[in-house]
Amino acid sequence: MKRTLTALLLIGSLALAQADGAKLYGQCAGCHQATGQGVPGAFPPLAGHVSEILNLKGGREYLIKALLWGLQGQIEVKGMKYNGAMPAYNGLKDEEIAALLNHIATAWGDDKKVPGFKPFTAAEVKALRGNKLTPQQVLEERKKLGLK
Ligand code: HEC
């Protein structure tokens, strides 16, 4: 009896530690689409674009901030202008944000275009959570990367 309980507790905590990025991405797919292609002019693509961001200095931190705090204002992705609002996901747990970022980095092969790509960790998300930003401030962070 005691052993069964311990086993159940163990399985339970493993399930908690392993956030499912593909499943969580269901929340994003309405806008960015299941294929990550987005909708031209309305929702920017993530497929083939996440690697562009990750290859910039500070890009990794920027992606975490965009997920935590959202993004608002005019941006340009692959020559197309967007001026929408990306919702903030700071209500999600650190491991869920990390799992989502790992999903969008790997689902369409972007990780293969980033030399030395390392999976996002919950600790990295936790480290940035303390400094709350507005979606407009996230746009400023985006500009600092040199993105239009
Ligand atoms: C309601 C629609 C919507 C949903 C849902 C949404 N996004 Fe976004 N996302 C946007 C828009 C619009 C932008 C661009 C914002 C702008 O124009 O300033 C964006 C921008 C982004 C960016 C930054 C791209 C860049 O070039 O800086 C990332 C990364 C991103 N979204 C990932 C996600 C992920 C992951 C999810 C799910 C957790 C998600 N988005 C959910 C609409 C959405």
Image (tube, rainbow, N blue to C red):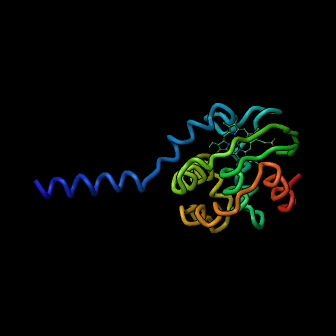
What residue lies at 62% left-to-right and 64% top-to-bottom? 117
Across the whole image, how many numbered discs are drawn on residues? 0
In this rendered view, identify the residue nearer to me: 9 or 63.
Answer: 9
Q: Is residue 6 left or right of residue 12?
A: left
Farthest left residue in view = 1
Q: Is residue 141 left or right of residue 63?
A: right
**Residue 123, how many percent across, how many down?**
55, 66
Which quadrant of the figure has residue 9? bottom left
User: Image height check: is 121 above or below 28?
Assistant: below
Q: Is residue 105 left or right of residue 19?
A: right
User: Image height check: is 54 above or below 90?
Assistant: below
**Residue 22, how many percent across, how many down?**
52, 43
What residue lies at 77% left-to-right and 51% top-to-bottom? 134
**Residue 54, how many percent across, how many down?**
71, 60
What residue lies at 88% left-to-right and 43% top-to-bottom? 74
What residue lies at 28% left-to-right and 57% top-to-bottom? 10
Task: Tell me, yes or no, if residue 5 can be seen here.
Answer: yes
In this rendered view, identify the residue nearer to me: 115 or 1.
Answer: 1
Q: Is residue 105 left or right of residue 71?
A: left
In this rendered view, identify the residue nearer to me: 109 or 43.
Answer: 43
Q: Quadrant of ligand 1?
A: top right
Task: Tell me, yes or no, if residue 78 can be seen here.
Answer: no
In this rendered view, identify the residue nearer to me: 80 or 114.
Answer: 80
**Residue 85, how many percent across, how many down?**
77, 39
Which quadrant of the figure has residue 55? bottom right
